[in-house]
Image: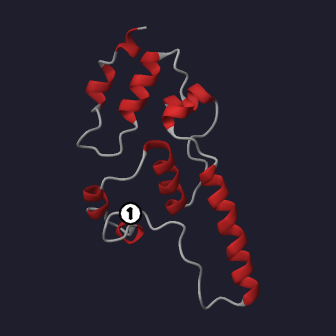
């Protein structure tokens, strides 16, 4: 939310779970393998055995020619949307070191290495 307030736009402008995960990887880097392997509730089907995100999803091989064409067009559109998402380090103004530092800390995907809420609130950014 801090990044959205800073930029004035949505960070992940999608309602599609696989596309959302692909955008997260563009912003913060690849998901940690052990984290992907622990995924549950359907998310486990979104990663391969090596922990890589299975995106874009394969097209339906049994679809009619017309449906396959629509699926292909939609997939190209979604890939372009993901490609337009810039990594976090490229999005942040280097002149505001405190904002940059707190956002880089908060966008760490692995919860074992990400700051807790208490740790984040002790960041000098919040002393302004």
Horizontal relation, residue 10 to residue 27: left or right: right
Where residue 16 sits: x, y (%)?
A: 56, 60
| Foreground residue among 115 and 79 | 79
Task: Find disc 1 in the rendering and name its residue.
Answer: 52
Where residue 35 sits: x, y (%)?
A: 28, 56
Where residue 100 sits: x, y (%)?
A: 45, 24
Residue 36 higher or lower than 95, as above or below: below
Horizontal relation, residue 85 to residue 76: left or right: left
Residue 48 higher or lower than 8, as above or below: below
Quarter of the image for residue 77 reads: bottom right
Quarter of the image for residue 93 reads: top right
Where residue 22 sits: x, y (%)?
A: 50, 56
Q: Residue at x 57, y 41 (%)?
A: 86
Horizontal relation, residue 115 to residue 69: left or right: left
The single residue placed furthest to the right in the displayed view is 66
The C terminus lies in quadrant: top left
Residue 87 higher or lower than 17, as above or below: above
| Foreground residue among 100 and 115 | 100
Horizontal relation, residue 94 to residue 8: left or right: left
């Amino acid at each position: 939310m801090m990044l959205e307030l800073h930029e004035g736009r949505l960070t992940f402008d999608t309602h599609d779970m696989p596309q959302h995960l692909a955008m997260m990887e563009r912003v913060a880097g690849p998901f940690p393998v052990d984290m992907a392997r622990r995924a549950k509730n359907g998310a486990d089907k979104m990663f391969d055995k090596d922990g890589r995100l299975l995106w874009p999803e394969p097209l339906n091989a049994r679809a009619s020619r017309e449906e396959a064409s629509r699926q292909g067009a939609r997939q190209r559109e979604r890939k372009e949307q993901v490609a337009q998402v810039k990594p976090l380090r490229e999005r942040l103004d280097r002149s505001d070191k405190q904002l940059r530092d707190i956002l880089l800390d908060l966008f760490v995907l692995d919860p074992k290495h990400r700051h807790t809420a208490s740790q984040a609130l002790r960041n000098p950014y919040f002393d302004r």
